Amino acid sequence: MATGRTHRPATRSRGIPEATVARLPLYLRALTALSERSVPTVSSEELAAAAGVNSAKLRKDFSYLGSYGTRGVGYDVEYLVYQISRELGLTQDWPVVIVGIGNLGAALANYGGFASRGFRVAALIDADPAMAGKPVAGIPVQHTDELESIIRENGVSIGVIATPAGAAQQVCDRLVAAGVTSILNFAPTVLSVPDGVDVRKVDLSIELQILAFHEQRKAGEGVDHEDQVAAVAPPVSAAPAGPDGPDGRHQGPDGDVPAVMPA
Amino acid sequence: MATGRTHRPATRSRGIPEATVARLPLYLRALTALSERSVPTVSSEELAAAAGVNSAKLRKDFSYLGSYGTRGVGYDVEYLVYQISRELGLTQDWPVVIVGIGNLGAALANYGGFASRGFRVAALIDADPAMAGKPVAGIPVQHTDELESIIRENGVSIGVIATPAGAAQQVCDRLVAAGVTSILNFAPTVLSVPDGVDVRKVDLSIELQILAFHEQRKAGEGVDHEDQVAAVAPPVSAAPAGPDGPDGRHQGPDGDVPAVMPA
DNA sequence: ATGTGTGAACCTTTTCACAGCT
DNA sequence: AGCTGTGAAAAGGTTCACACAT
């Protein structure tokens, strides 16, 4: 990829490592829970345990945001919640559209975590005319024809694609053309987007395959596998500790069409 | 969580980097598509484009599996499909149980990508007695009481948790006690598991927050157009899995510009 | 005392670039 | 001539360990 231009000025502060950004939502969720229990402060050790990471990493992460803690004491929960929310851009409202209201799309529309974090489902869009007008999660589904106007009228910059794989790229192109610059893709396809557009994907099939890989290794802690390539040996240590977790309710993602798309 | 797993040196050639493992499913999908189009061979360049990564990375990844290519020619599609499938453990059948048949659970049960990759939904489990017997995706839902017997009778080692956050840990404990050693968690909670059990999480809320972070930065950015590389978005979102698993990758716009930020 | 903040060491992953097969 | 396979360099991320503020 490339996208030339500025490299990190190294001048300090503004460049937060991607790995850190990916963990901020985790900390935020843990902090929100503490906040709801009216806990005033936390140590990096406690918060790290709640978020599922180790404390050194957490402190390093926070150091990229600034010095929000107090030595000998810990971090002020409310203050940190605010700082992280601001850093993530959650202090503003993000209208989101979900395209493809099938099993998955409906699950996403009902996802409680949406609203609780500054995200607002601005519209549900589906290509099936029969779906039009039908309410899902209290929001009437609109036809794909309306896509462009919906995006523009609502100032939507984030789109969620939950369509079958075959329709994903086309939907993506339309979203981008209409002004969307961030896409969360649940369809099992690689999307091509112009420079400046972010794409993140969630893929159940891939997660399961990764689990299968590790599962397979566990089976033969001493078993040998020989094929031409041979030598399976010492099991690569192994399991991860439970990481994560963000906020709120439940219901999440995924599920959708298979990867097989006979061309 | 905690669970510190002993990290072993893993001094052996068979150790495939976690980052590589996370990409194998991607390659497999691209290869499967080529296979269906009866394409006999591919170059690293072509395959990389189809998978959304760069060719150097792909070649390096394959080098960990062995030397399956032919210099001056490329890779034999069928052969690679087989080798990667074997490496991922997809040549065997993996019975899976899905716990929590709500909106999301139902979507997962209907997910086509399951069966197409060696995964078989052995059972759907829900705590609601009213759901019992009701078929979802052609499979009758069973009550949580049956959980242990289902796992044991079917030799299930992979479980998917799609319950509300509040029930996740309890379900997790029961799955693990019954013999499950790999868990895919969709509930927004940090799960504690004993050593030797793998947990991967998928969290919509987190993905959206990460997108929001980047979206926020774009506001004051003068998106530059320097190199118009064909722009493929290599997303790859992995979840923590390894030792202490971090997560998140993402191809971000390089420029970090001031952006609005009242110090 | 206690727990943050952080340079430095260490490990992982990506990218480069080219030698070596076909 | 073409494309893989891979050492070596670079970049990125994690962990250590301790000075320092409270």
Image (cartoon, coloured by chain):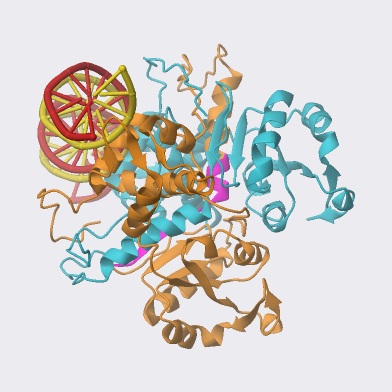
Chain colours: A orange, B cyan, C yellow, D red
Q: Is residue B210 above or below residue A193?
A: above
Closer to us: A257 or B189: B189
Q: Count the marks.
A: 0
Res. C17 image quadrant: top left
At x 53%, y 59%, the residue is: A186
**What is the x, y in percent for residue A19?**
33, 44
Closer to us: B157 or A251: A251
At x 56%, y 21%, the residue is: B196
Say whether residue A206 is magenta: yes
**What is the x, y in percent for residue B183?**
61, 35
**Residue B3 shows up from this direction:** yes
Answer with left or right where residue B61 lies relative to residue A171: left
Answer with left or right where residue A126 lies relative to residue C12: right
Say whether residue A118 is magenta: no
Q: Is residue A123 above or below residue B209?
A: below
* Quadrant of the drawing holding the C terminus of chain B: bottom left
Res. A113 image quadrant: bottom right
**What is the x, y in percent for residue A64?**
24, 45
Q: Which residues are magenta?
A: A196-208
Q: Is residue B10 above or below residue A108?
A: above
Closer to us: A45 or B240: A45
Closer to us: B44 or A147: A147
At x 31%, y 69%, the residue is: A194
**What is the x, y in percent for residue B170?**
69, 34
Answer with left or right where residue B91 lies relative to residue B138: left
At x 42%, y 36%, the residue is: A47
**Residue B42 shows up from this direction:** no
Q: Is residue A32 above or below residue B153?
A: below
